[in-house]
Amino acid sequence: MPSFEPTVFRGQPAVRLALPEGDACIVALHGAHLLSWTTADGVERLYLSPQALFDGHSAIRGGVPICWPQFNQRGNLPKHGFVRNLPWRVAPADERPTTSSRELALVLADDEATRAVWPEAFNARLTVTLAPGALRVTLAVTNTGTTSWPFTGALHSYLSVDDIADVQLEGLQGARRWDAVRDERLVEAAPTLRFDTEFDSVYAAAAAPLHLLQPRGTLEIAQSATCTETVVWNPGAALSAKLADMPDDGYRHMLCVEAARIDEAVVLAPGAQWQGWQQLTVL
């Protein structure tokens, strides 16, 4: 029995992956963008802006955008690279012999359009693994060319929260931190992060999973060792009001906690593959 099916989401082609227990997620073909993850209790675990653009060309605000092969504006490519704005295709997943999880894979390879922006040969594969109360998103990239090339990137996860004022993030105490709002480097002293204004920081990834605490419960956030940084972002009231694709109060209902590779670019040799993942688990 197939575990996923084609669907349409806000007018755009997508794929829905579901478990018998009721857990489900939806991935757009545009950008291989994870749009929704609901657990068996019916709770939506990702934030998707109600004003997000679904025109098949623009980046989508919310869910899990793929930032690759460049993070933010740290390079000469468009912001956060270009793969989040291209059509991907569904591919056979490497199904594990288990009845408790299901996988969905989407792939993208270089073509004339990508080489006009970035002249490298690559194959990218996003795998979404859904299990009861858990979701893993894995990005794998392979150098299919004849020369090495560098990249940075992130799985830019927007997590749903009931109210940012009631949210705490644990697990980053002692981590090196670059505060992008104040442009300063420090070591995180707080055992628990709270969010009452714009927050934008790149942390050295912690060895243990993080925990997002709010009245609805706790979400555990883990990432692969290949993702050497964790980005934590909330736009706050002032910036949220300036974002055309987010409601003025959108900041109250989301927190980005991203698995990233930023400070030291990966240099991928011909024929080599790099893999990075983030896993979200409801505790």
Image: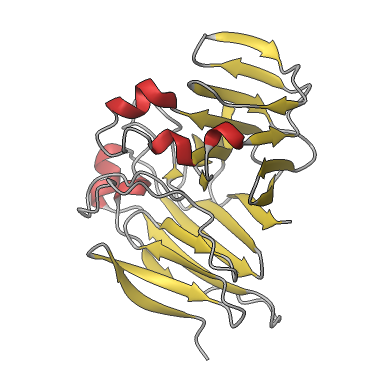
Q: Residue 76 versus residue 115: which sits nearer the camera?
A: 76
**Horizontal and vertical percent for residue 115?**
29, 44
Q: Residue 235 versus residue 15: which sits nearer the camera?
A: 235
Q: Quadrant of residue 229?
A: top right
Q: Residue 104 versus residue 218: which sits nearer the camera?
A: 218
**Horizontal and vertical percent for residue 231?**
57, 31
Q: In the rendered image, is residue 197 in sight? A: yes
Please determine whether, in this image, residue 123 is positioned above or below residue 51.
below
Please determine whether, in this image, residue 210 is positioned above or below residue 41.
above
**Horizontal and vertical percent for residue 34?**
44, 57
Q: Is residue 73 left or right of residue 23?
A: left
Please determine whether, in this image, residue 5 is positioned above or below residue 172.
below
**Horizontal and vertical percent for residue 6?**
35, 77
Q: Residue 1 versus residue 89: which sits nearer the camera?
A: 1
Q: Residue at x 53, y 47 (%)?
A: 270
Q: Residue at x 52, y 45 (%)?
A: 162
Q: Is residue 192 left or right of residue 272?
A: right
Q: Quadrant of residue 33?
A: bottom left
